[in-house]
Amino acid sequence: MEPVQKKRKAGMRQAVLNLEESMIRQVANAGMGRSDVLKFWFGESDEVTPAFIRDAAVASLQQGETFYAHNLGLPELREAIARYATALRTPGATAIGAERIAVTSGGVNALMLAVQALVDAGDEVVVVTPVWPNLIAQPAIMGAVVKCVSLKPVAGQWQLDMAALLAAITDKTRLLIVNAPNNPTGWTLSRAEQETILAHCRRTGSWILADEVYERLYFEDTINGCAPSFLDIANPEDRLVVVHSFSKSFLMTGWRLGWLVMPPAITPQVGKLVEFNTSCAPVFIQRAGLVALQRTGDVTPQLVAHLKICRDTLVPQLQAVPGVEVAPARGGMYAFFRLVDQQRFGDSLETAKRLVVEAGLGLAPGNAFMVNPTAEAQGWLRWCFASRDVARLEQGVGRLRRWLGL
């Protein structure tokens, strides 16, 4: 009889082996050790977290809060998140209670917890792309069959083909993943589009996982000062999970603190998953998050105003560069632009590596955000414009121009 050991699979799971190395990290590695590189490749501001938020964490540590917390988060933080999320809703929206909130160790952790909770191996998952690569990798790690529906670029502005999306979501679709405002394109769902998607997913019985971490980083005039949210139109029992993070709106990327909003019936089950992933978010970090929410008016409005200045500085200068196609993002912190000469710049990864080495300009390659990109999607690069010093953006455009020989 064959030994049991020989029947076991050798090595790691194939789904893990199939994961690709981050293309953004590949570009960053090309610039390691170079202090002259202007770095716009990662999705974060170069501004430090406000002092009053840092001080809250220090005070917590000095008080000895170094022990485990509840899996779902400190009760006072969950209540504060519920109040904050409710205050952002449009008139007529359902209030959000703390029983629908789980505190997580970052937005990435929130997304992975949601996928773990909802997706079995072999399930069909539809993802709207271009998108941050983690949103495609996470269901793939769970063994899901991932189908991508791509936005379409029109004069640099990305648009949703609603007919194609609805055709892709059937009664076999377990989960739809959509990120809006979108990283990298800045595309944002309209209220009408959200209503159409929600109604369709109710008919098919599909879950929606909405990554809305850029909700507050929105540059259009709205009644609540943020982008349209599925939470504005959904019922508490809808098959909807919304992910948020402290990272972007509160300048807290390195703190790793986020949250989930979900139907109350599944919150205890997600609490079990938190136990088996991280046990809980650190208490001193949760204390910092609580103060951030209490003083959001001292952080987010100024941040959004500055990001708008950054966008409105960078985009017109890029538009003035011959051979560049770009439109201003409605939300987020990125300019997603295209070098139209496909013969020279079709491979975005190689172009991004060359820009680092030859021009000292660090950008993220567009094909990091796409799966099997079509010819029309080649040549795209992502520029994070969240720069404390706007002059760095102007310097970067100058380096791009010189590299293009202009």
Image (tube, rainbow, N blue to C red):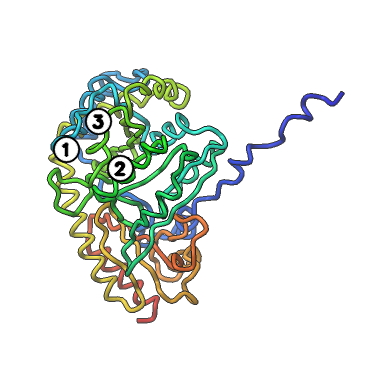
Measure the alpha-carbon separation of dots 3 and 1.
Answer: 12 Å
Q: Mark 2 packing: few (<14 Cα in 10 Å), some, or many (20+)?
A: many
The percent coordinates of residue 82 (x first, y second) are: 22, 28
Nearest to viewer (mark 3 / mark 1): 1
Residue at horizontal 21 percent and vertical 50 percent from the top = 218
Question: Which quadrant of the rendered structure holds the N terminus?
Answer: top right
Quadrant of the rendered image containing residue 152: bottom left
Residue at horizontal 77 percent and vertical 29 percent from the top = 7
Q: Mark 3 packing: few (<14 Cα in 10 Å), some, or many (20+)?
A: many
Measure the alpha-carbon separation of dots 2 and 3.
Answer: 21 Å
Up/down of 252 relative to 31, above or below: above
Nearest to viewer (mark 1 / mark 2): 2
Measure the alpha-carbon separation of dots 1 and 2.
Answer: 17 Å
Q: Earlier in the sequence, mark 3 or mark 1?
A: 3
Q: Earlier in the sequence, mark 2 or mark 3?
A: 2
The percent coordinates of residue 370 (x first, y second) are: 46, 56
Q: Earlier in the sequence, mark 1 or mark 2?
A: 2
Residue at horizontal 43 percent and vertical 20 percent from the top = 272
Which residue is the site of mark 2?
A: 212
- Kind of residue indicated by mark 2: Glu
- Kind of residue indicated by mark 3: Ala
The percent coordinates of residue 60 (x first, y second) are: 26, 23
